[in-house]
Image: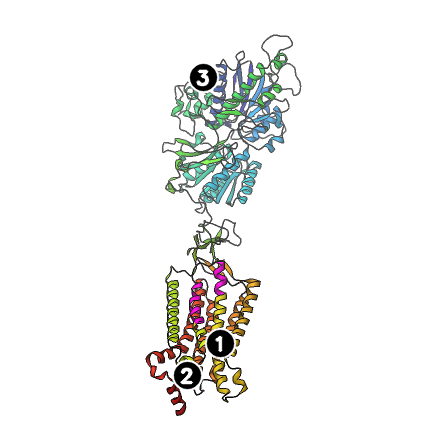
Amino acid sequence: IKHQRYQPGDLIIGGITSQLFMPSYSSFLFTENPQEVITDEPIFILKSYQHVLSLVFAVKEINESPQILPNHTLGLHIYESYFNARITYQNTLNLAFTEKKTVLNYKCDTWNNLVAVIGGLDSETSLHMATILGIYKTPQVTYCSFDSFECDKTLGSSLYRMVPNEAYQYAGLLQLLLHFHWKWVGLISTADDKGEKFVRTLEHLFSQNGICTAFTQKIPNSSVYLEMDDMIGHWMDMVALLSSPSVNIYIVNADSRTAMQVLWFLVLDVLRGSKPIEKVWVLTSHWDFSSETFHRGLDIKIFHGALSIAFHWNEVEGFQNFLRILNPSSEGDGYVKMFWQQAFDCLFPDSDDVSDGNKERCTGEEKLETLPGPFFEMSMTSQSYSIYNAVHAVAQSLHSMYSSSTKSKTMVEEDHQGPSKPRAFELHSFLRSISFNNSAGDEVTFNENGESKGGFDIINWITFPNKSFLREKVGKMDPQAPQGSQFSINETLIQWHNRFNQVVPLALCNDNCPPGYSRQIKEGEPFCCYDCKPCPEGKISEKEDMDSCFQCPEDQYPNEDKNGCHPKIITFLSYNEPLGISLAVLSLSLSLTTTVVLGIFLKYNNTPIVQANNRKLTYSLLISLLLCFLCSLLFIGRPERLSCQLRQAAFSIIFTVAVSSVLAKTITVVWAFMTTKPKSKMRKWMGKRFANSVVFLCLFIQASICAAWFCNDSPFPDVDMHSMTGEIILECNEGSTNMFFYTLGYMGFLALVSLVVAYFGRKLPDAFNEARFITFSMLVFCSVWMSFVPTYLSTKGKYMDAVEIFSILASSAGLLGCIFLPKCYVMILRPELNNREQLIRKKVLK
């Protein structure tokens, strides 16, 4: 086998790498034995050569350390997989046997001192290796990511992963998209089972988190194309799809094959002179700028600003110096010359390749640091770091096994000669429980599933015109961290593609619905595509892209734009506002006027005009009117339980006294003229007792109504949060609204009776006949309270109290003005008319 690397040692660590790609393989016709050697010159994936060097460096570091395996030396034996299952199986068997021919399940003392195997690059190669190594219980430490279910399908008990479970990588991709609010993305994967699993898993996660896939592009393996034209045509269709302006984010399952093909069709697109694809590439952990020799002219600036999930790594001290002294004539290394020739585009004098005589001769003095980043890097990559840790994990486990007194006896050969040879399966118990800090300070340990407990780094790829690039760590994904802090990212460190002017790119099917709107799904479109519908009245949406609008808390109300809530103000009819002050001043003014009128009547108490119509009823009416004006003040101020009950009781009782007094005066006047005979029996009933009885009876009925009202459902202070937008109304709840209108209706009934009686007595002959004045006053009273009912029911908040106060004042003022002001006019301005002679003269004249 031409391409391998061997270094002798007491204990051998094997390796299967994937760095050579065969452009074609011979077909097997089953008519002759297949060839056992590879005849075609393979294509070197130059970046992958660092995997071999990191393994060699780790072995060298361990052999030079007196703390690890001081009495033993580590050797290595590395074979190539060629990305081919048949060759992978063959070379895995070659690791276990020293003879050229392998005889399965037959031990004839031809076994190597193989203690563990490192590899492979992808899950397919690793599983092919595990199929063989699992039979012999040989520990295998791989540096590729796949889930535990895949391992369980093989002999997974011998398989250890130096990287976390693939499910964490999916979670990291999801968190990355959610962090930047990217909801409209494209998926690119290989057209195989692995690619199908990648797409299926992500689409399931996306649908649960509100993310849609704009398209899913699967890249077939080049072997499926019958003609080169078919392959190029497919790639051109793919380029056209990726150039779509509606999608800015592409998620690529970037294993080595996918990355290779993506680079190929980008080369073809550049050759066609097409406009560069300026997007954001989000890449999985296997991504690297690993160009083939054919890609020397490829401009990698298309990937500037790309983001990728990478296995956590740190720079290992001494590794770059190790690379600087690399000698292309190293013994036992079957890779280095091919790498050197393809990397530096030269030929060694003894090379078998004579196809291109124009190439320069390789001197061996070329410097690795002069190679562009896509060909080779001096810094250790994340996969090389995993290989480095894998070798140290095996070495630490061997050291623990040799240090164990219980194991020392079993590791001595039967002839007691030579160094002790461990049996590979005995290493498992030590490897499972291994835990140490490597030279970079990172902890290396496995969980119960044989997976590394490490995390992922979020990498921002920054490219430069000279085709070099920089990996910038901008975040991390730590599965071991507490819930809620597993994902972190620093946006300020990220450099985006120049097209986006250092602004976070948008990835939406349509523009976000602004606050004040809600999303409305479009028929026949993915759920990420929607229309924006304004929030209905009374509801808001305070964030972008809300599924529905919602109501503000009871103590808040929507603003004009329906994107936020303002605190409601507490309102009630207060003495501190103009309306309350105006009504209070008006009430006090009318109260003062009534007091003045009462004083005038008291001053002229013995005059005919005062005596003519029952002085006690007159004083009763004036006092009740005075109290009516004053009781309106109970409606102003913060509602309390006492004030709520007192104001309705006072209003009902006092007004009933006033109206019943008017009714008694009216009946007295009319009845007096109906019983003109001096000795009429009916005149006996028209005295003071009758008037008092009318007032008392009316008052008793109203008091009974109020008592029933207060006993069953009395008024109480209440808070109304819904009637007025932006206001919390402190009000007096009437309790039983029916009882309130019963009291009001009863007063209206009394007023209506007074109006009817007064109307019929308005023309009775009397100088001081009050019937006509009572008629006008009752007309005013009834008009006020008839208009009060619809007005009161149509207003809200403090204005309801204002309407009731105004009705009390207006109706009371109507009674005061219509009944008493004419009499005051006579008593003060026309005193000559206020005498008995004038009364008699008027009667004679009439």
From which residue to which does the magenta span run? 623-648
Mark 2 and mark 1: Cα distance apart in space: 21 Å
Mark 1 burial class by Cα count in 10 Å: few <14, some 14-19, many 20+: many
Q: Does the magenta stretch include residue 638?
A: yes
The residue identified by callout 2 is 768
Mark 3 and mark 1: Cα distance apart in space: 125 Å
Sequence-wise, the earlier of marks 3 and 1 is: 3
Q: Which image quadrant: the N terminus?
A: top right
Residue kind at label 2, given as amino acid type? Phe
What is the total number of numbered labels drawn onto the structure image? 3
Residue kind at label 1, given as amino acid type? Ala
Sequence-wise, the earlier of marks 2 and 1 is: 1
Q: Quadrant of residue 820?
A: bottom left
The residue closer to the viewer here, 418 or 190, is: 418
Q: Give percent across and percent down for residue 288.
A: 46, 31
Mark 2 burial class by Cα count in 10 Å: few <14, some 14-19, many 20+: some
Q: Give percent across and percent down for residue 312.
A: 48, 29
Checking the image for residue 209, the label placed there is none
**Circle nearer the viewer, 3 or 1:** 1
The residue closer to the viewer here, 227 or 769, is: 769
Farthest right residue in view: 106
Sequence-wise, the earlier of marks 3 and 2 is: 3
Q: Give percent across and percent down for residue 806.
A: 42, 69
Q: Which image quadrant: the C terminus?
A: bottom left
Q: Assign the magenta stretch its main secondary structure.
A: helix
Checking the image for residue 751, the label placed there is 1
**Circle nearer the viewer, 3 or 2:** 2
The residue identified by callout 3 is 329
- The scheme the figure's colours follow is rainbow
**Tag 1 secondary structure:** helix
